[in-house]
Amino acid sequence: MTDETKGTTEEAKAQPGATRPTGTKNEWEDLGHRIEAQIRGEFARLAGVEESADWDTIGHQLDVKMRAKTASGVGAPPDAGWDEVGHTIERRVRTGVGSTVGAEPGADWDQIGRRIESRVKTEVAGVAGAASDDSWSTIGNKIAGKVQKAIDDVLDTHKRPQEPPKTEGEKSRGNG
């Protein structure tokens, strides 16, 4: 056993069921380099560059390809930068949300937010029996009043005196 493998062999013996590594440190380094070369080659093929290209070249080319693919998917020019791609996505989402809530075409997020609030307020005001141009405070007070009335009605129903149950004799005499 060489000094290079002694430590790992001793560690393997200490772990039941563990496999003992074999080979020298140089053999393991060589294996690591070969694995890295295979992985780099696969990514290089994906990027469309030579398999021997360095990681910087591969990374740059992958970025170019992903950006172009994403740009074409969202309707931006294929040579658009990430900022333009992001702005295109945001514009499309804003337009879709604005259209869904009935905002004017080209509305910004503030206008869309006001439109959503207006629609919600109109619905809630209708439930409360308030006007849609009433303040939120007025609408809330009307809803609170309706809830309180409903609770009072339920409590009043349970407070009313109920007739005692009829006896068998009352039932047989036709009183029940």
Image (cartoon, helix red, strand yellow):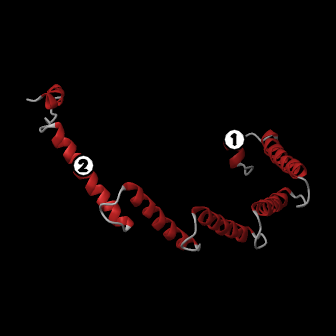
Note whether 121 is above or below 13 in the view shown.
below
User: What is the secondary structure assignment of the residue under circle 1?
Assistant: loop
> In the drawing, what numbered circle is on residue 4?
none
In this picture, residue 137 sits left or right of residue 168: right
User: Residue at the location (32% across, 65% down)?
Assistant: 50
User: What is the secondary structure assignment of the residue under circle 2?
Assistant: helix
Quote the CA–CA distance across marks 1 and 2. Answer: 98 Å
Along the line of sight, the residue nearer the viewer: 107 or 136: 107
User: Residue at the location (84% across, 44% down)?
Assistant: 148
Which residue in the structure is indicated by mark 2?
A: 33
Q: Where's the N terminus, which quadrant?
A: top left
Number of residue marks: 2
Task: Residue 11 in the image: state x and y as whole percent.
Answer: 18, 27
Q: Quadrant of residue 49?
A: bottom left
Q: Report the residue that reaches farthest toward the left.
A: 1
In this picture, residue 75 sits left or right of residue 132: left
Task: Residue 137 in the image: state x and y as whole percent.
Answer: 89, 48
Q: Quadrant of residue 126?
A: bottom right
Q: Amino acid at mark 2?
A: His
Q: Amino acid at mark 1?
A: Thr
Which residue in the structure is indicated by mark 1?
A: 167
Along the line of sight, the residue nearer the viewer: 85 or 59: 59
Give the mark, 1 or 2, whose residue is nearer the N terminus: 2
